[in-house]
Image (cartoon, rainbow, N blue to C red):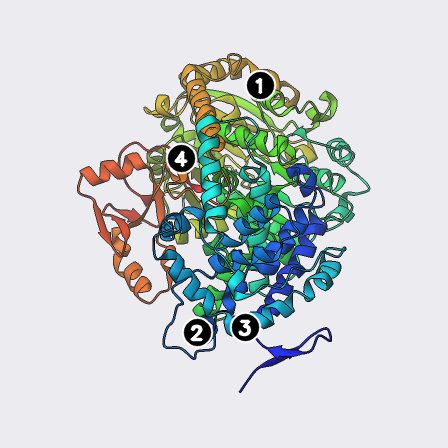
Amino acid sequence: MKNWIRAYGYGEFMVILAKEDESLLEHTENTLRVLKSIKEAYPEVPQICGIDNFWDILFYSLFLHDFGKASVEFQKILKHESKEKYWNYRHEVISASFVRSLRFIDDYSTFAIALGIITHHKDIQVLDERYSGFYKPSSNEYDIFYQKVATLQENIGELNTYFDYLPVFSKLYLGHELKKPNNISINEIKPVFVESVGEYLNMMDDYQSSMEENPHPILSLYGFFLKGFLTTCDHLASAGIYYILHASKTFNSYENIKDHLRSTQETASKTTGSTFLIAPTGSGKTEAALLWALNNQNEQYSKRLFYVLPFTASINAMYKRFQNEFSEELVGMLHGNSSYFLYKQLSEGSYEDKKKYVKELKNVTKKIYKPYKVLTPFQIIKYFFGVKGFEMGLSEMTGSLVIFDEIHAYDSRTTALILSILKVLHNQYKVTILIMSATLPSFILDLFSEKLGIDNIISLPKKELDKYTRHKVNVLEGSIFDFIENIFNDLSDGKKVLIVCNTVEDSQKIYEMLNVENSALLHSRFILRDRQIIESKLDNLDLLVGTQAIEVSLDISYDVLYSQPAPFDALIQRFGRVNRKGWEERIIKTANVCTIGSKYDDLIYDASHIEKTISSLKNVDILYESTIQELLDEVYCDGYNEEDQKIFDDVTNSFNEVYNYLVPFINDKSNNGFYELFDSVEVVPYEFITEYCDLVDEKKYFEAMVYTLNISNKQYSIQKSKNNIEYEKDTIFVNVPYDSEVGLRLNNYESEDETEIL
């Protein structure tokens, strides 16, 4: 039975399919519906990339992008009328050849259109390798091409009738009418492979060999946007999504704070442009950030907001908060284990149903759809290393609002990467930036200010700042293990005690020594299942022992702290988990800092920074908030130490080299060492090998993930040398003891790593 379609009064014709359940004309129009939404959300794109008719070029690219599917062979496969499952030819190669119908458009533009079409599924180097025969006129590549083109003969008439729709669609979805393409015959369809792919690769080689300052626009923002937005329109339309969401005009907690805004919140609500926000923990920085974001939105409320945090625990918490502030539909989350976290949020449905839902949610979150995303910095950094889909990521960030919270939490390597990407985003992609911290050494602030050209700082005046004073500092001469009796006395007095160690090994040791009933240990070497259980009960413990994982963003409040020595900025974060809201009732509680730490501290922290910190704290009784910046700058008066400065400079220089070679339409399959940035190996404790492998065999991958954790590359090498590493189901198993309360027992040095930030 023949399928027919009637549209816009142009008459009836045979249905050419783009997908099993969607005609080519329907899919084309649906991609153009997404284009309309993208154009409205990103009005500044033509100006940023310097191509006045950018939206016209994208429109023509989308209109023609699937014309190659009109092949009778391809249609039979879609309609299940063929024994073949795949066509064994790229329809994009033929689709791109339909630019011959745009004879009224200049060569510069048809080159871009052909390039956009021919790469909308496959990387340009993949195409170049597969169709290398096009560069040899004597090869049979041309014969194969024309054989495939001949299979369009039956449908070429219908394709020509589609051109009648272009002026209609352009008026509807662009707001102005574009010229109709010229009808084209089979004999006029010639390959444009060499003129598009070949020409582009030649241009790229010339650019990368000379590093000229002003390359062809297609090698820069023009190409990034063309590829990024074309992919977005195609993918969203294929997913049945025909518009992108806009940001909210307010947030739910605003009604509760609008009549009594704190000074930082009031200032943030009136601040336009990039800025710093330095304010104590508990002073309402998140609300201030949201007020700043609202004040920097455009009239359409279409600017995307990226809220960047360093650790998965804080990202998960902020994701939930954003869902409450806005709505679930508007908010997305991206980090290494976000799929697992989303899966665990679902309480109903079969495993397959939940898996399907999570996959769909994750896929749409990666695309330009949701206006709010909570994520790690590495989810942004990876775009600059050319990972698959990077053009879409960079396109999405154009003109956006980026909030970097807890900027103090990163080492010199990551700080260099963050500063480098922000410089590009700020200068080229016109991104507006808010950098937030409770504690930030002046040399870091000055560094960001100079490189990004940001000179505005929102902070509290001294009098208001001191209202947040809530800690008394007590320096204890000796090791934390010398004060077991003091800890028991505090517990006996009904105090909730927090202990922070510098290494996992020390935290495990003191936790077992204390053996307190209502207590928990928190560090990076717990499997996901146990870590989630521990994090769920942090508010109701008498004793919490942990590592640097406790420093950042955990919304907990204890009565007294015992800490191993650390640099002042790290200690301030540990102090922030004690008496968190004490300033509201003018309550002061004690933070004890020991002078002797782990025997491996010199491998974790700069010894001079610890020495200066302890020396300064010996002169402190009540730690007034207004004195923190002064004390912090005393510790970091010389900036980074020699080793960290070298790392910072080397990473900055390496990033610049990588970015200079980044061009659109080409995924860097080596990722230029991107994943080498992470000192991380995912493993499963050997005792769970049966459970894990059974779940993998059942294809219950989310359930299997509960048994995973990360160890450092160094630890992996050590355990491998001890023959403690085994491999099964493409998974690494580490054969050392594991305990649900204490975690993985490696019994040698391991500081709390930051592998979670992936």
Q: Secondary structure at mark 3?
A: helix
Residue at the bottom extreme of this rendering: 1
Q: Which residue is mark 2?
A: 77
Q: Which residue is mark 3?
A: 155
Most foreground residue, 400 or 728: 400
Front disc: 3 or 2 = 3
Count of all numbered marks drawn on residues in the image: 4
Q: Earlier in the sequence, mark 2 or mark 4?
A: 2
* Quarter occupied by the C terminus: top left
Question: Which x, y percent locates residue 711?
Answer: 33, 41
Identified by mark 1, the residue type is: Asp
Question: Which x, y percent locates residue 649?
Answer: 46, 20
Q: Which residue is mark 4?
A: 677
Q: Which residue is mark 1?
A: 621
| For the residues bearing labels 4 and 1, Cβ distance under 8 angstroms | no
Identified by mark 3, the residue type is: Asn
Q: Secondary structure at mark 4?
A: helix
Seen at 51% across and 12% down, the residue is 638
Q: Earlier in the sequence, mark 2 or mark 1?
A: 2
| For the residues bearing labels 4 and 3, Cβ distance under 8 angstroms | no
| For the residues bearing labels 3 and 1, Cβ distance under 8 angstroms | no
Question: Which x, y percent locates residue 43?
Answer: 72, 45
Tell me the distance, in whole angstroms, between the alpha carbons under discs 4 and 3: 51 Å
Q: Image quarter for residue 634?
A: top right
Tell me the distance, in whole angstroms, between the alpha carbons under discs 4 and 1: 41 Å
> Mark 2, residues whose alpha carbon is within 10 Å: few (<14), some, or many (≥20)?
some
Identified by mark 2, the residue type is: Ile
Front disc: 4 or 3 = 3
Q: Is residue 335 visible?
A: no
Q: Is residue 155 visible?
A: yes
